[in-house]
Amino acid sequence: MPRTTGGRTIRFARTLIPALVAVALWIPAARAAEPCGGIRLVDGQVALGVELPLDGDTLESPSWAACLDAVAARLGERPTVRAVTVAVRMPERDRGETDPLALAEVISGRLGATLGKGRVSAVAPRPRLGEPANVQIAYVEHRAPRPVAQLVFAGGAVTTGFDDESLAPAHVGKLLAPSELLRTAAGSVAVIRLVDGSQVWVAPGSLVRLSRVLVDKATGRTVRIELFEGHAEVVATHADGTFDVVTPAAVAGVRGTDFRVVVVPAGARLETLDGGVALGTPEGEVLVGAGTGSRVTRG
């Protein structure tokens, strides 16, 4: 029905108010549907939209277990998180038969199943005067290392991380840190560009680690790439220093610009496309020139 105010007519749409009411009801419902009512990482603390229950049996129920798993997943997404501490503070009068340390260990155990037990600890500090019983999840971050490479091409499923458990999908433009792993799934390829301009083509079904990538004006570069599975092709820029690709069977050291290394079940195979590559084993070293190849058998 129209309403007249000061000579002006205001019309209320019949469908507008119900729609606004529906939105108002949807917002808290959507937040409640999020794990833990929402998870935020703020200044070294995990902030949840709900309070964790102070009961071990309740925490192990499916809904609260899913909440803690979501917390662990969120922390795991941040590679700079070094350690996590679960603290349960509980005044003596509120404890009853509850052991605050045992409760903290229930939470830390659940988080540790995803993050690694060595990264999560449990404590039960004495609460401050007047402080109610509460659970706090804190984390410590180390300074993010300077990137040493960038993913410039990703075709198919390419994942990166610092260990097999933390491998996550990676996209073009991702910066790679020292000691980071890169895995390509079957039928997938990746191209990495190092800070010195060299490029590494990673073939399908391969696993590599950027063990060490240093560029120093005085001493030149130091590059060490580990190839655990599959094969990779390296196009190395001309520079002083060392550039090695390490396989379980041998070390290929750049003496030119373009070569291919393949890890095979019994060892490794090297193909030099341009320049020269020194292929070394505990028994000695051989220079593999352009247009030639060599094979190393383990044992």
Image: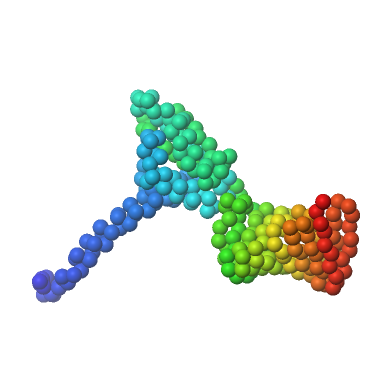
- Residue sitting nearer the eye, 219 or 176: 176
Q: Residue shown at 48%/34% (left/top)? A: 105
Question: Where 76 sits versus 60, above or below?
Answer: below
Point out residue 222 in the picture as x, y percentages from the top left corner: 78, 57
Describe the colour scheme in one phrase.
rainbow
> In this image, 26 relative to 291: left or right?
left
In this view of the protein, can residue 34 be seen by the observer? Answer: yes
User: Is 37 in front, or is 24?
Assistant: 37
Residue 209 in picture, x, y percent from top left: 69, 56
Total label count?
Answer: 0
Query: For the point 15% across and 73% down, which residue is it?
Result: 11
Q: Considering depth in this image, is 291 or 103 the residue closer to the camera?
A: 291
x and y percentages locating residue 50 in the rendered image: 36, 45
- x 46%, y 30%: residue: 101
Q: Quick check: 227 left or right of 11?
A: right
Observer-nearest of 201 and 142: 201
**Residue 257 drawn above or below residue 129:** below
| Residue at 70%, 68% in the rendered image | 201
Residue 107: x and y, percent? 46, 39
In the image, residue 99 sits, relative to residue 136, either above or below, namely above
| Image quadrant in which the N terminus is located | bottom left
Rendered image quadrant of residue 33: bottom left
Q: Quadrant of residue 296?
A: bottom right
Left or right: residue 262 compared with residue 25: right
Relative placement, left or right, of 193 versus 29 is right
- Does any portion of residue 215 appear in the rendered image? no
